[in-house]
């Protein structure tokens, strides 16, 4: 069964790596629904957050392919239950209509929105939240001549994650010891098979 | 050699020498132990070729006739020598001509370092003359690639390139160097080999519980069956593998890239897997109780229909590449790691066994196959020669000591089925990508990688015409390769499929050949062409004994088919004997 998975990838900051990762998806004709790259908590380590809708089996295989790339340190995949995630959305609406027809204050309060810019000709609102929340505000603002809408990629934090500082130390050892290696999803699964 | 390398490094450090990027590149190659380069010069790689002029005594450069020939030669070299093949090409068309070879090396895990020239850095992205976005074109077909625009990067990037290409599951690496970086002088402080990259784990960590689980499962098995691939050769684990199957009494069958890792005549060698493999290994895959896959990746040409593949069996999968585990066939016990290390660990825990009855089953199957297929192939009732008998006579003459390089198609399947091997790294073929035109240039490289061995390139009349220009390379360097063309006047494998699955609608498989002997003669290569059985042995013997390159064309049956065959979309146990 297909469902939404969030893939988190820790990488070196290398030119061309985005392409190397992206083609792993396009080769399998998988559409990337959202993609974000940013620095991570560790200096020099980059973090990709990619959202796709696929079966777990496909996601697991693709994550292994991602991890196999030389400049990738580690890749994880999670269901929506296992992460805290947010997206940011911006809405541009004509100020005169808004000022005339909407109780702006109520709008802001109900949808947790914030006015970023207020000019004579237009106003830009911003909300942060999950997909349904940002979608609802589009519906409302569409009635008031929404001029422009944009939503950012998802950013997500894995609930169980302990960050990457410790993990990086393992990678920096030329000869890692088994006790230092955290069990991965693959190993965990294989473990249960043997028992 | 070793002291010379140290001297060079020391000298460089003392002097803190100013050298060019091109010189730094060649220094890197020497310190990495490279002595052979296959390449073709051009505008954007001219500074490197200029530097090479002064390194002629240390680096042997083979001028090929086409960059595709260069990279296939690099592959052949890597496969017989066990070292990393090195290829030079210029920017633009030079680089794009490498793509087929990169894809081939990628899918067949062949270690290569390819150096391409690139336009000046300030011209990148301007559609300059012979500019191509080589990095992005080659990303899906390289294990790693990198563009250098500053000479200071050269030592470190080259060290990474050689480390990545050869370690773990090997693969091709491409380094694109802009012309300014090749020309640029910089303070060279020596070359340090790379032994660790933090984002790259070439070998997964071996987990002893899986070793134990694997050994337990094999010890309990009644009908264990080992299938092995190129991992055994790449891991140089031939001895470890033999000890493993001998202690467990385990019948073992090979993929075409695993061929020659275990000598043909070994009593536990039960033959070839897959679409045109032997009858027993295919049928028994669906009868065994434990299937032990060693350094192979369950390619579809080996498994046939996956939902009818070894469903009754527990699967143990040994592989160095974790992404191969569960990719096509689910493993009950995944043994990650280098099989050179994991095999002896399992062998230690094995009980000495002898699965005689089970092994006899394979012998029985072989009898059926001999009756239905092999007898007719070896002793045809007509005057027309078969590919099988040519290979069989070749075996007699070479005693299985030759390196056999094959192209792609019917002759490849026949050669793999019937060629005999006594040594590892002796079967060189394009497996995963199925690249017609591979054999002739790969044979050139194979000879440089194994100079003291006889190298025979077995090629069809289709494949030879794809890279026939490399006869020029053979001529110029007097490379002692034996070219055996099995000419059936058809694109035989496609024709076979059209006969069996497309109602004999022979669509564009009727290929004409030039007079190959005359072509060879034009290249000052001796040759002969035969179609009579009576002349076969002496013609092969003349070819093998000839001092230098030799081309022998043998006309074989036009519409002969390769059997057994697992038709596409069928399970392995549905293998057809006719």
Image (cartoon, coloured by chain):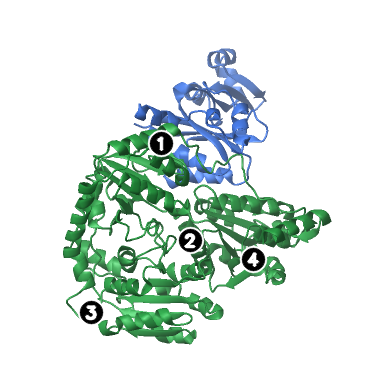
Chain colours: A blue, B green
Residue designated by label 4: B129
Residue designated by label 3: B384
First of labels 3, 1 by sequence position: 1
| Vertical comparison of A126 with B100: above or below | above
Residue placed most toward the observer, B183 or B377: B377
Check residue B79 in the rendering and tell me which mark sits there, or answer none: 2
Cβ atoms at labels 2 and 4 below 8 Å apart: no
Q: Residue furthest front?
A: B352
Distance CA(mark 1)–CA(mark 2): 29 Å
Name the chain letter of the residue that bears numbered label 4: B
Residue designated by label 1: B211
First of labels 2, 4 by sequence position: 2
SS label for mark 1: helix
Residue placed most toward the observer, B386 or B5: B5
Badge 3 and badge 1 both on one subunit:
yes
Name the chain letter of the residue that bears numbered label 1: B
Q: Is residue A92 left or right of residue B426?
A: right
For discs 4 and 1, the disc positioned in front in the rendered view: 1
SS label for mark 3: loop
Name the chain letter of the residue that bears numbered label 2: B
Distance CA(mark 3)–CA(mark 1): 52 Å
Residue B320 in percent (x, y) is at 46, 44
**Residue at x-position 38% and y-position 85%:** B528
**Residue at x-position 27% and y-position 68%:** B495
For discs 4 and 3, the disc positioned in front in the rendered view: 3
Badge 1 and badge 2 both on one subunit:
yes
SS label for mark 2: helix
SS label for mark 4: loop
Name the chain letter of the residue that bears numbered label 3: B
First of labels 1, 2 by sequence position: 2
Residue B133 in percent (x, y) is at 59, 56
């Amino acid at each position: 069964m297909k469902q939404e998975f969030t893939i988190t990838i820790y990488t070196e900051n290398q030119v061309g790596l985005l392409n190397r990762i992206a083609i792993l998806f396009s080769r399998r004709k998988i559409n990337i629904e959202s993609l974000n790259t940013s620095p991570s908590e560790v200096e020099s380590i980059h973090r990709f957050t990619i959202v796709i809708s696929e079966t777990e089996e496909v996601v697991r295989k693709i994550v292994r392919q991602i991890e196999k790339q030389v400049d990738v340190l580690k890749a994880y995949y999670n269901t929506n239950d296992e992460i805290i995630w947010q997206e940011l959305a911006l809405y541009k609406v004509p100020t005169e209509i808004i000022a005339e027809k909407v109780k702006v204050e109520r709008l802001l309060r109900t949808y947790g929105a914030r006015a970023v810019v207020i000019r004579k000709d237009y106003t830009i609102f911003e909300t942060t939240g999950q997909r349904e929340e940002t979608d609802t505000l589009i519906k409302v603002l569409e009635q008031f001549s929404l001029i422009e809408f944009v939503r950012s990629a998802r950013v997500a934090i894995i609930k169980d994650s302990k960050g990457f500082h410790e993990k990086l130390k393992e990678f920096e050892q030329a000869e890692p010891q088994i006790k230092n290696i955290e069990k991965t999803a693959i190993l965990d699964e294989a473990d249960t098979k043997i028992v | 050699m070793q002291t010379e390398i140290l001297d060079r490094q020391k000298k460089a450090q003392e002097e803190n020498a100013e050298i060019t990027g091109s010189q730094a590149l060649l220094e890197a190659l020497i310190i990495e132990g490279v002595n052979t380069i296959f390449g073709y010069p051009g505008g954007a790689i001219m500074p490197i070729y200029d530097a090479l002029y002064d390194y002629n005594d240390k680096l042997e450069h083979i001028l090929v006739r086409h960059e595709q020939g260069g990279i296939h030669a690099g592959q052949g070299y890597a496969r017989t020598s066990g070292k990393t093949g090195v290829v030079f090409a210029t920017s633009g068309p030079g680089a794009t001509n490498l793509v087929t070879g990169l894809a081939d090396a990628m899918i067949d895990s062949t270690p290569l370092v390819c150096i391409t020239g690139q336009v000046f850095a300030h011209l990148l992205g301007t559609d300059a003359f012979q500019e191509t976005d080589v990095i992005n074109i080659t990303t899906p077909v390289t294990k790693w690639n990198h563009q250098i625009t500053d000479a200071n990067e050269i030592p470190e990037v080259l060290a990474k390139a050689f480390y990545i290409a050869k370690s773990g599951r090997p693969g091709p690496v491409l380094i694109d160097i802009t012309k300014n970086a090749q020309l640029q002088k910089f303070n060279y402080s020596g070359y340090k080999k790379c032994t660790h990259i933090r984002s790259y784990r070439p070998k997964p960590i071996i987990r002893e519980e899986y070793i134990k689980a694997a050994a337990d499962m094999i010890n309990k098995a009644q009908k264990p069956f080992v299938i092995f691939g190129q991992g055994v050769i790449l891991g140089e684990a031939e001895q470890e593998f033999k000890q493993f199957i001998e202690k467990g009494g385990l019948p073992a069958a090979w993929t075409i890239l695993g061929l020659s890792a275990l000598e043909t005549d070994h009593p536990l060698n039960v033959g070839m897997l897959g679409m045109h493999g032997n009858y027993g290994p295919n049928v028994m895959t669906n009868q065994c109780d434990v299937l032990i896959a060693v350094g192979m990746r369950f390619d579809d040409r080996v498994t046939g229909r996956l939902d009818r593949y070894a469903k009754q069996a527990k699967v143990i999968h040994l592989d160095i590449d974790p992404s191969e585990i569960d990719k096509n066939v689910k493993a009950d016990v995944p043994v990650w790691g280098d099989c050179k290390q994991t095999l002896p660990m399992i062998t230690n825990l094995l009980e000495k066994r002898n699965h005689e009855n089970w092994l006899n089953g394979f012998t029985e199957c072989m009898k059926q196959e001999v009756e239905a297929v092999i007898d007719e192939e070896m002793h045809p009732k007509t005057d027309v020669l078969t590919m099988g008998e040519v290979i069989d006579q070749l075996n007699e003459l070479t005693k299985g000591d030759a390196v056999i390089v094959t192209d792609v198609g019917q002759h490849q399947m026949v050669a793999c089925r019937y060629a005999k091997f006594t040594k590892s790294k002796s079967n060189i073929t394009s497996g995963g990508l199925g690249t017609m035109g591979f054999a002739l240039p790969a044979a050139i490289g194979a000879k440089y990688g194994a100079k003291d061995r006889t190298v025979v390139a077995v090629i069809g009349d289709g494949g030879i015409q794809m890279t026939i220009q490399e006869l020029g390379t053979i001529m110029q360097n007097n490379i002692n390769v034996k070219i055996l063309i099995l000419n059936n006047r058809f694109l035989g494998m496609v024709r076979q499929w059209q006969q069996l699955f497309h109602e004999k609608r022979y669509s564009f498989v009727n290929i004409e050949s030039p007079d190959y002997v005359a072509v060879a003669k034009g290249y000052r290569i001796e040759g002969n062409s035969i179609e009579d059985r009576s002349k076969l042995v002496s013609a092969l013997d003349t070819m093998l004994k000839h001092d230098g390159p030799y081309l022998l064309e043998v006309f074989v049956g036009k519409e002969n088919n390769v059997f057994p065959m697992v038709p596409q979309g069928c399970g392995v146990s549905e293998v057809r004997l006719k």
